[in-house]
Amino acid sequence: MKVIGTHMPACLGLLAAGTVMVVMSACTAPAPASTTTEAAAPTAVVAQASTAPPSPSASPGTSATVGAVVAGFPQKLLPLMPGAKVAASSFDKSSSPATVALVGSVAAKPAAVVAFYTKALEAQGFKAVPGNKVGAVVSKDFVRAGNETVNIAVPETAGVSTFTIGANVAPESVK
């Protein structure tokens, strides 16, 4: 259990951030093609070098979107905090454990964001793991049944808290 409180916050935060980066890179429009023959060859080389991995939505059971809660998102598991705006969301209900990610922002203090999600998660049987920060970032981990985990990380800039939530839960938790 101590390993989760010590090492897992950073790992889960990185997992959630990585999911968001994949979601965002999958939704980025490609650069327009050059109209000259001389510029076309270097552009093709750059495109090959910077090709993003396939979209998470390419796999059956995986959904992701930017700017909204993706259709079918398990809102009972991770409800959207009132007043929050969604930056990205994703979930893969076909893997075991199922993975769920939510990134949003709200004009609230990080402690208020953590308090909202603590209440929501504890009502579902998750237990908070000791520790409230990773470096200077407010971060909280939760565990249920010994193998289901949720991490929330909440940096604040200019009065706006941007929260990233990553969950690894039993597939039946996202139905």
Image: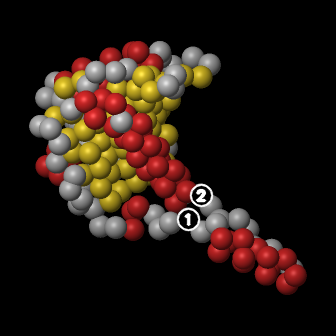
User: Does 156 sit left or right of 43 as displayed?
Assistant: left
The amino acid on which the numbered mark 2 sits, given as a three-letter code, is Thr
x, y percent for residue 78: 29, 35
Can you tell which of label 1 and label 2 is closer to the viewer?
1
SS type, badge 1: loop
Crowding at mark 2 (Cα within 10 Å: few <14, some 14-19, many 20+): few
Pointer 1 residue: 52
Q: Is residue 119 above or below residue 50?
A: above
Where 10 sits versus 41, above or below? above
Does 21 appear above or below 32?
above
- Residue at 45%, 19% in the rendered image: 110
Which one is earlier in the sequence, the residue at label 1 or at label 2?
A: 2
The residue that disc 2 covers is 28
What colouring style does the render use? secondary structure
Helix, strand or loop status at disc 2: loop
Q: Residue at x 17, y 52 (%)?
A: 171
Left or right: 29 as drawn, with respect to 111: right
CA separation, marks 1 and 2? 10 Å
Residue 38 location (% of width, % of height)? 87, 82
Q: How far across and down, in percent of the image, does residue 128 sit?
A: 24, 24
